[in-house]
Image (spheres, coloured by chain):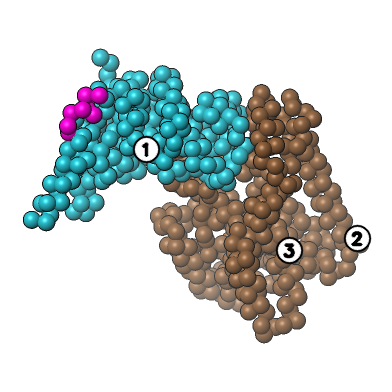
Chain colours: A cyan, B brown
Amino acid sequence: MDAPVLSIEDLASAFGSNRVLTSVGFELRERETLGVIGPNGAGKTVMLNIITGILSPDRGRIVFLGRDISRKSVVDRARMGFGRTFQIPRSFENMTAYENSLVGAVFGAGRTEKSAGTGVCEILDLIGLGGKKLDPAGKLGLLDRKRLEIGVALASNPRVLLLDEVAGGLTESEITEIMGIVRRVKDSGVSVIWIEHVMQTMLHGTDRVMLLNEGRNVICGLPEEVMSSGEVEDAYLGSGIHARTERRG
Amino acid sequence: MLQTRSSDHAPMIAPGHRVFGIKIGSAAVVVIVLALLPLYASEYAVSVGILIFLYMSLGQMWNLLAGYSGLVSLGQQIFVGIGGYTLAMVTQAYQLSIALSFFIAAGISVVFAFIVSFPIFKMSGVYFTVGTWIVSEAMLVFFRNWEFVKYDAGYNITVAYRISMPALYLGSLAVGVGSVVLVFLILRSKLGLALMAIRDNEGAAETRGVRLYRTKLACFLISSVYTAITGVVLYLNITYVKPGAAFGIDWTVCMVFIAVIGGLGTIEGPIIGAVIYVILRQYLYNFPGISMIILGVVAVAIIMLAPAGIMGVLRNKFGFTFFSVGRQLPAGFGSIRKKAAGRRGRPS
């Protein structure tokens, strides 16, 4: 087995007395899509924010290609090869789809505007925004905005792509399309961490699935194994019931 | 948008070059017509023109800060004051040339802006705004108590008496047009791409690798230097410099008015805003007691009716822009542009 692209070691994070992550640790391999599931409040997005440097953890290390990057800034990590999408698309609304992606290519991948142009256009074609390159991002629909999120992240030429609920709110066929895009991205040599609630994407669109619950990773393995393990049901239903009864008692 | 149309005829050439040429041409004609104004217009019209161009420059520079990099400064009068006082000291106290004062004003303001950036860039949002204001108030107090500049007495800038009105007009025109060209070139550059991203979403820009601090600092330095240069010309027109007026917040209040009324985050906005502001203010001299109230009412009315400013309405409703800083697709992708343009079907 190759050395992992990214290894997360014992992350912990708390907002005041509210402990969001107690201990999260896992490895992301070369050309792998790792699905992350877990109930609301399990700490999935917080974990992503820590990995990209938006939040800093109270404890733990993030090792990227053998280097400890725990103290690097958001910008440094973006330039090193972390591309991410946001649950609620954060596009540059007054800029066109093309310009949005150009930002990723120029500042994330460190290219010049001139040399990046063709590559950016190809990415927009790949993600299905080929005909809307010059549409302002603010005028795009939800699916197109989610596509653009992926496009901007890809334009920054990432080694690791972090997807935060890109399939949420989309129709069945749109989800299939997004899964196709993610697969092609992975095949091009990018490792992907994909947070999602839509089970279909986790079952068919990932190589491994990790369950996050109450701030720790409970189980990690092949998608079918994890889904049928009973832990998932526990996390989504069981522990919730326990917690509620405990609080009452 | 205008450029997209031309690609219908010349799909393989980088689209929009022809329209770009037409725009440059018409802009040049406008500048020439304006430059010849002293030959055919009244002295009063020329004096109003001077003010319009200088205030346009001030508005343009404030807009570069607030409209693009999100730095809402209430302290830009610092640099107007530096410009005015540099002119006074260089030409009166040292009897040196006016030309030299431009360079010295630029030099002093870039150093000063760089030094104050350390404390005030540690603050963000409203705190930054208050911080800049405090620095400018401190400058005012400092100048009032500084022997070198004759305390509160101020200076008559006598060299300015020898400058003819047409010469001053041409200088102001150069400063005004220069400010537009400067902002246009910045927005077309890599710095501009970063600024537009910051304008739209600061957090997202950072996640995409845009260095916020460096970008904003560059913007602050450029804006400060050009405001100081504008200040030199302003004081050639005013001919008398005094701390209270030079470092007064009135300067920044009118910059805000011009940029907000015209449309924040657009190049055209401060041009429109400056024309409205200067003409309105000339007219309001007839109502000395209530002129500020009327100005305030106009500002509130426009902000309520058109929060994005006049240019914002023109752009959002009608897709109109003159100074297009949008990026064009690389050559091979020109045909797609045509399709996209057709679908958008915006009236031009």
Q: Is residue A227 magenta?
A: yes
The residue stretch that appears in magenta: A224-231
Mark 2: amino acid: Leu
Q: Is residue B20 magenta?
A: no
Which SS does the magenta portion mostly show? Answer: helix
- Residue B17 vs residue A185: left or right? right
> Residue beneath label 1, please?
A164
Q: Secondary structure at mark 1?
A: strand
Say whether residue A181 is visible.
Answer: yes
Q: Nearer the viewer, residue A36 or B247?
A: A36
Subunit ID for the residue under disc 2? B
> Residue beneath label 2, please?
B39
Residue B224: x and y in percent read 58, 55
Give the CA separation, mark 3 to mark 1: 48 Å
> Which residue reaches farthest front?
A172
Task: Give the residue at x 50% y 70%.
Answer: B137
> Residue beneath label 3, please?
B275
Mark 1: amino acid: Asp
> Which residue reaches farthest right?
B40
Say whether residue B191 is visible.
Answer: no
Give the CA separation, mark 2 to mark 3: 21 Å
Q: Nearer the viewer, mark 3 or mark 1?
A: 1
Q: Nearer the viewer, residue B271 or B157?
A: B271
